[in-house]
Image (cartoon, coloured by chain):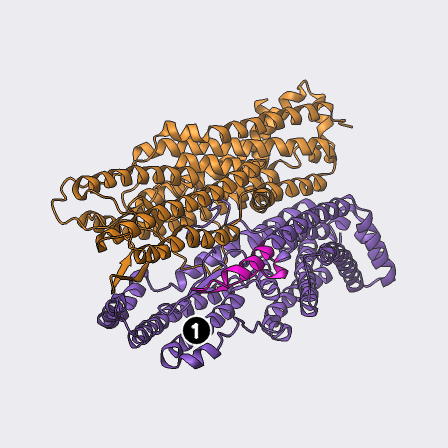
Chain colours: A purple, B orange
């Protein structure tokens, strides 16, 4: 009997016009966006390779370049907005990234804060809407059509019926998701300029799993509302209101809230702390600058110049990294507050999996600071031990990104909350359905 | 006809979504007002400290021009929170004051301004009000009954249209009122009477935007007979208008642009400076050795000349890059104009004086001011030294003794500064704002006419059985 229910429901869904329309919309959007995003990635990657070849080889300067993440094709996250270049010089510990042209002006400010249209966006917004359209009528329509009574007149317990609806609905939703993701992955795999490593594939698999969890939250929510509200049209309205709140409004408001609840120290405070450091070093810096400006400067002057400037830089760096820590704390609070919205949870997990979140940025910057320290050390060697300097080489820039296992260890709580969301909604639907008045 | 409008309007007003919309509208516009007032107060403090500093210490070494915070930003922020708060001006060189990147770790969210609430939330609600206007009545069978009365189809549709507009405008007007009260009461300086004209204009702009979605809903509702399908299709169009088209247009514009990208420009920069400046300055030592110069002064004059020539090339290079970026921005904007949501946003920005037009206006005033300052320096000091993003200092040997040559430094004029030019920022008048918004307004009108025509012709042919 259970099997009959599931098969019947699945066929109902597959035959329905709204499933067909939803699937067409999703597939077209995913195909178009992945194509566009692959091209964008290829462009950025080529830029990165060219720049690495030339800018890093500049004789007078050391530059660190940040390349695009390959998985940003599916989940752009912050990947495109963080800047690409760190210029290394003795007087400044790297604390921020800039664009390669160093023009400190954002591009496209009118449009910049729209969310990128990528796989994650389409699942988060478009597919979740589609799921609502599939789920809202699951019980309400049968009730309105009068078939619910008839179905339950058979030797079929209520829980089996609801379970059957859940299983069939999820099967259809996940099937659609599989089709959509397969499409995206095929575009990725077929493009000659995109190469995926084994861990990338694992991460993509993780993304699919989280997408499935996310969509099942909305299916369970739909089922719950469908059980509670008798008129299908009203159920749909309630669901859409909930969707707008959970997907559009709450994630926005929670960021604003976090900004107010966990404020950062003011710009003046930070500037004053830095000024205090600079005051301590001012006399020394003036002295070494003057010495170096004279035509008679010696190797000793240069060494002292480096020492004073790099000490100053380290002290400024302490202020910078404390501020950076507070920024991260604010971000974590925003994430925590927004955790009530499945859409925000989903975003956090997807960004982490794609390595397009702030965590990746911070690892990169830590690597840049390490490189700066070895750069300064080597520079000092030039004036203390020229032979050793000639033999030594500046290490290549690198940083250890989180392994897939580490990432999964970091995101499982969010994934668990997503799972709990669907469990709670389904339980509510279940108890609601058992008590439901069928007349 | 009146009966129709009244009946439909009452239907909407009693519905669940209307009540939710009304409550949400009041809450969100209030939140938007409070967020804006707080941010604006911070910007105001920043502006005043920076400006008084500039006025107290006028200097020929450079000036900092800070943009006055726009009092109408609560309608359409226009990305102003990401734009430079002003420019440092030195010898005709403009350096944007870096935007405060303090919160870059937080998810980038659009400003909670009217434009966001209208574009995203209200357009969705207009759809929810209108999607079953025709298809719902058809499903329930009431459409036939209504049309059995002596009532033309055109009149029926006009009635439905008016009721949707009325039901959407009431919560919006309530929200606007709340927002204006909060902004007017708490904003330092409050709202000027002249600004209210602009607010009123934006109000009507919003109605035009609502109207477009009302027609769109009626069109789909007449074409598709199942209400749930109508809604699904409308939501797909809504997602495309509000996010997909504007957001994709950036990526597509970058791809289509023939101008070199940022990194490609950066790659060309270094070799150019090498060839135009460093090689030539390096050549000076050889010329010194050949005995081309008689005094140290002559060497300095020659390196100054080389540096200034190179400097002009660098300035031009950056100007070209800025032009390429602007071009890409214009292309992205032009493409995004397929979406009426973008048309609406740009028009609202122009009217409020924010956005690209607002920044361009400020920049042109900066250029004007910079010319005035250059004139002052020329009068008092006889020479304008352009200060660049880079400078140089190198050792040479002249007649057996080491000398240092370096890039020219601007001079500080210590005499009478009373006639030093003062910077007064002017906001473009309403007429000018209208002129820059004209294209977008026309676009919205065209969408309205097109969709109205389609909706009516679709409804006239609808099979009501």
Please provide the residue range marked out in magenta.
A44-72
Residue B350: quarter of image = top left
Nearer-the-camera pick, B39 or B421:
B421
Q: Is residue A416 visible?
A: yes
Which percent across, then down, holds residue A353?
62, 66
Please name the residue shown 51% across and 53% down the image: B263
Which percent across, then down, holds residue B371?
28, 38
Residue A156: quarter of image = bottom right
In the rendered image of this protein, does residue B77 appear above or below residue A310? above
Q: Chain of mark 1?
A: A
Q: Is residue A52 magenta?
A: yes
In the rendered image of this protein, does residue A118 appear above or below residue A334? above
- State the residue lying farthest toward the front: B290
Residue B382: quarter of image = top left
Please name the residue shown 13% across and 49% down the image: B414
**Horizontal placement of A172 versus B316: left or right?**
right
Which percent across, then down, holds residue B324?
49, 42
Image quarter (top left, top right, bottom left or bottom right) of the C terminus of chain B: top right
Q: Is residue B30 visible?
A: no
Q: Residues within 10 Å of mark 1 (few under 14, many from 20)?
A: some
**Horizontal placement of A219 versus A102: left or right?**
right
Residue under pointer 1:
A375
Q: How many marks?
A: 1
Which percent across, then down, holds residue A293?
26, 65
């Amino acid at each position: 009997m259970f099997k009959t229910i599931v098969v019947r429901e699945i066929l109902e869904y597959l035959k329905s016009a709204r499933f067909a329309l939803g699937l067409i919309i999703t597939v077209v959007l995913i195909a178009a966006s992945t194509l566009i995003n692959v091209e964008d990635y290829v462009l950025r990657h080529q830029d990165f390779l060219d720049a690495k070849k030339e800018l890093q080889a500049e004789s007078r300067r050391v530059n660190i370049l940040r390349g695009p993440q390959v998985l940003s094709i599916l989940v752009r996250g912050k990947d495109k907005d963080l800047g690409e270049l760190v210029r290394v010089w003795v007087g400044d510990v790297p604390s921020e990234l800039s664009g390669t042209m160093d023009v400190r002006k954002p591009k496209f400010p009118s449009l910049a804060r729209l969310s990128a249209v990528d796989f994650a966006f389409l699942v988060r917004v478009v597919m979740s809407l589609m799921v609502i359209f599939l789920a809202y009528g699951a019980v309400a329509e049968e009730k309105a059509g009068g078939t619910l009574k008839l179905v339950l007149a058979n030797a079929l317990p209520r829980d089996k019926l609801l379970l059957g609806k859940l299983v069939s609905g999820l099967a259809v939703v996940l099937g659609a998701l599989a089709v959509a993701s397969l499409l995206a992955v095929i575009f990725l795999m077929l493009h000659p300029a995109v190469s995926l490593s084994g861990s990338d594939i694992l991460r993509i698999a993780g993304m699919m799993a989280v997408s499935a969890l996310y969509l099942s939250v909305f299916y369970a929510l739909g089922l719950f509302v469908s059980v509670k509200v008798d008129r299908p049209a009203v159920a749909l309205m309630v669901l859409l209101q909930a969707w707008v709140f959970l997907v559009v409004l709450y994630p926005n408001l929670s960021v604003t809230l976090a900004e107010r609840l966990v404020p950062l120290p003011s710009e003046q405070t930070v500037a004053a702390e830095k000024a205090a450091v600079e005051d301590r070093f001012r006399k020394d810096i003036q002295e070494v600058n003057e010495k170096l400006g004279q035509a008679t400067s010696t190797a000793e002057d240069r060494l002292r110049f480096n020492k004073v400037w790099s000490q100053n830089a380290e002290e400024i760096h302490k202020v910078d990294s404390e501020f950076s820590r507070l920024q991260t704390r604010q971000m974590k609070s925003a994430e925590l507050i927004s955790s009530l919205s499945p859409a925000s949870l989903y975003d956090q997990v997807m960004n982490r999996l794609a390595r397009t979140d702030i965590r990746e940025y911070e690892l990169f910057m830590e690597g840049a600071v390490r490189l700066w320290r070895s750069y300064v050390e080597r520079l000092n060697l030039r004036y203390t031990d020229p032979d050793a300097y000639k033999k030594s080489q500046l290490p290549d820039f690198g940083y250890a990104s989180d392994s897939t296992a580490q990432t999964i260890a970091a995101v499982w709580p969010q994934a668990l909350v997503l799972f709990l969301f669907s469990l709670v909604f389904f339980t509510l639907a279940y108890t609601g359905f058992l008590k439901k008045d069928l007349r | 006809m009146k009966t129709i409008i009244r009946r439909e309007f009452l239907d909407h007003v009693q519905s669940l979504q209307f009540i939710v919309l009304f409550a949400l509208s009041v809450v969100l516009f209030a939140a938007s007002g409070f967020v804006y007032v707080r941010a604006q107060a911070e910007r105001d403090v920043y502006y005043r400290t920076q400006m008084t500093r500039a006025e107290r210490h006028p200097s020929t070494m450079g000036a900092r021009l800070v943009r006055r915070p726009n009092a109408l930003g609560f309608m359409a922020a226009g990305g102003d929170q990401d734009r430079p708060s002003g420019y440092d001006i030195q010898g005709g060189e403009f350096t944007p004051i870096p935007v405060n990147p303090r919160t870059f770790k937080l998810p980038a969210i659009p400003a909670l301004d009217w434009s966001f609430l209208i574009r995203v939330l209200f357009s969705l609600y207009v759809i929810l009000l209108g999607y079953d206007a025709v298809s719902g009545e058809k499903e329930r069978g009431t459409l036939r009954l209504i049309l059995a009365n002596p009532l033309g189809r055109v009149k029926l549709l006009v009635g439905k249209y008016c009721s949707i507009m009325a039901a959407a405008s009431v919560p919006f007007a309530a929200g606007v009122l709340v927002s204006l009260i909060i902004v007017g009461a708490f904003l330092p300086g409050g709202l000027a009477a002249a600004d209210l004209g602009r607010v009123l204009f934006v109000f009507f702009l919003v109605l035009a935007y609502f109207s477009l979605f009302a027609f769109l809903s009626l069109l789909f509702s007449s074409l598709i007979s199942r209400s749930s399908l109508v809604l699904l299709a409308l939501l797909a169009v809504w997602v495309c208008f509000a996010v997909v088209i504007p957001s994709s247009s950036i990526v597509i514009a970058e791809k289509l642009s023939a101008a070199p990208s940022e990194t490609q420009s950066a790659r060309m920069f270094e070799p150019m400076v090498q060839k135009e400046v460093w090689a030539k300055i390096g050549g000076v030592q050889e010329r010194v050795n050949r005995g081309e110069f008689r005094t140290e002064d002559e060497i300095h004059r020659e390196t100054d000349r080389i540096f200034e020539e190179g400097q002009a090339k660098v300035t031009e290079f950056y100007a070209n890059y800025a032009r390429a970026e602007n071009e890409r921005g214009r292309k992205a904007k032009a493409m995004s104009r397929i979406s009426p949501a973008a048309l609406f946003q740009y028009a609202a920005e122009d009217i409020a004086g924010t956005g690209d037009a607002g920044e361009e206006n400020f920049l042109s005033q900066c250029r004007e001011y910079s010319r005035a300052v250059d004139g002052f320096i020329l009068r008092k000091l006889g020479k304008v030294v352009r200060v660049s993003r880079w400078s140089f200092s190198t050792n040479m040997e002249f007649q057996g003794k080491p000398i240092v040559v370096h890039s020219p430094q601007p001079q500080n004029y210590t005499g009478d500064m009373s006639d030093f030019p003062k910077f007064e920022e002017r906001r473009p008048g309403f007429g000018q704002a209208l002129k820059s918004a004209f294209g977008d307004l026309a676009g919205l009108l065209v969408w309205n006419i097109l969709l109205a025509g389609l909706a009516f012709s679709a409804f006239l042919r609808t099979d009501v059985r």
